Amino acid sequence: MSMPTRLFDPDSALDRLLAGHRPTPELPPGARPRLSAAETAFLDTLRAWCADDALAAHVEASAQLPDRLLVELDELGAFRITIPRQYGGLGFSDACLLGALGVLSAAHSTLCEVVAAHQVVGAVRPLVMFGTEEQRSRYLPQLLHSASAFALNEAGLGYGIGPLSTTAWFDADNDCYRVSGTKTWITNATIASHAVVLVDLAHTPTSAGGITALLISSDDAGVVRGPHSSFAGLRGLPNGQLHFDDARIPADRAIGSTGEGIDVVLACLAACRAALPVACLATVTTCLENASAWAREERQTTRNLSTNPQIQAHLADLTTTALIANAVTWFALEPSCSTLDAEAAKVIVSELAAHATDVVLQVVGGRGYETAASALLRSEPPSHIERIWRDTRITRIFDSSTEMLKDLIAQPVADAPKLQHLAPSAVSADATPPTPAVSEPWIAELSASLHESLASGPEDLQRRAVAVDCALALYAAHCLDHYRSHLGEDVAPTTAAWNVALDELCTQAEVHLRRLDDAPSRVARADLAAELTSGAINRTVAFTLPLAEIGATK
């Protein structure tokens, strides 16, 4: 079977790095949206609400987000941020929505997830983007005060978007779709008034069928919500199953054209790519603030712990991690950012957030590992590090996992054009990489080496997997260099963090380049994985022998 391929994107900084060229440094002037006075006031009000120290404790103590908090979110306008004004919403921009998600995430990740699941991927966005005017006029006013959901996941769906077991057929006699199946791990499923549900529509003489998006109400006959799903993190998340037992959904509830539900999925996932780095950046910032506060505590300075070289290494690590996360998120929020670059940002910032939570937990120690509720019982100031550590782990998995997105990026580019033959608007007329306005020539040099090494074995899956890691390090460096220039820190830097972070990314890229040429190591790892999956490794003998020997000495 041939390896999947994808098209070269001339607007993608990541694709240009994989092609061996430094991306053009210029960004469209004045393209970034600015918040209106009303949007700024809304975020200030939301920030004041989130400042309540007891808010996180209320969420943590509940199996599902308390009704009182849902009412307060509604009163704040959190469920209607982007719903256009003509339908009763606030009519605010996506930039304002992202700002709200960052504020909510800093207070508690579950609050962010509930609002994001409603307006980033829930019923709101599909109706605005794909619904008819009649559908928007009828259903958007019903979504002003309560959460909605987006139902794609199924227990057996697994990796990527595969065959759906939730099926539907069109009942012409009753002018409705008959839906059967179960959707699993659906955020807001247990509280949603409406959900956009992806079904596999049967082929009929009047319809080609295929993946179709249907707007389903929780009140529709044959729709059952629950049971509630609970996880290691995201306490209080209203997540669960949606079960459809021959549910009859009116024909006018199809969102977009029948058979084109994948377009709805991709549009929602694209919105997630922007939202998740914002939420993860809030996590990284919180980790840095916690570590900084810990280092300044009198009991730490008295014991000289903050000057310990091991602790200093952790604090420096958190500083550069936060700087890189800021730069990548800033780059991804550029309106002209390509889909591939946004996917790369999701990978990078979610991995950085998980790393930051682990580092801050190690720095703070036992106090960070203890729950806030436990600390309060001892009349100690509560720490939220344990909660943030739990909550952040899922970000590397949902909205497409790190591995899934890396596999997508790793696919060979089908018929990639030579850069010098691209349109002048996309690249300079000659084959020479454009002269960067920023000051890190090693990015272009290493990207050229990456392209050369990758070209020597383009069908080698292991080689491509390593190449993606190298490209992501170069992409992060490119974002950081841009961000530094944007802030004027390239001329008179106010912190050594810029150079330290760029040096670290350079080292990462060089390490990955060396791995690209280490074929025996790649083969050995693949063989080892094959041994495990085939059962060739005898776990009883290989991994219990030391314990058996200890037992024999007694």
Image (cartoon, grey):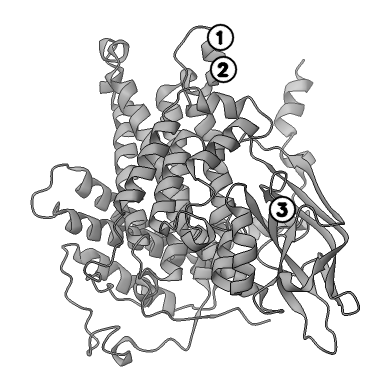
Q: CA distance from mark 1 to mark 3?
A: 46 Å
Residue highlighted by disc 1: 377
Mark 1 is surrounded, within 10 Å at the Cα level, by few (under 14), some (14 to 19) or many (20 or more) other residues, namely few
The foreground one among 210 and 21 is 210
Q: State left or right for residue 404 relative to residue 443.
A: right
Q: Position of residue 380 (x, y in %)?
A: 46, 10
Q: Which mark is residue 373?
A: 2
**Relative to 433, does residue 512 appear above or below in the rendering?**
above
Q: Earlier in the sequence, mark 1 or mark 3?
A: 1
Q: What is the number of callouts on the image?
A: 3
The foreground one among 274 and 251 is 251
What quarter of the picture does the C terminus occupy? top right
What quarter of the picture does the N terminus occupy? bottom right
Q: State left or right for residue 301 relative to residue 282.
A: left
Q: Which mark is residue 532?
A: 3
Q: Tell me if label 2 and label 1 are in contact, CB under 8 Å.
A: yes
Which amino acid is tagged 1? Leu
Q: State left or right for residue 346 relative to residue 334.
A: right
Q: Position of residue 15 (x, y in %)?
A: 39, 74
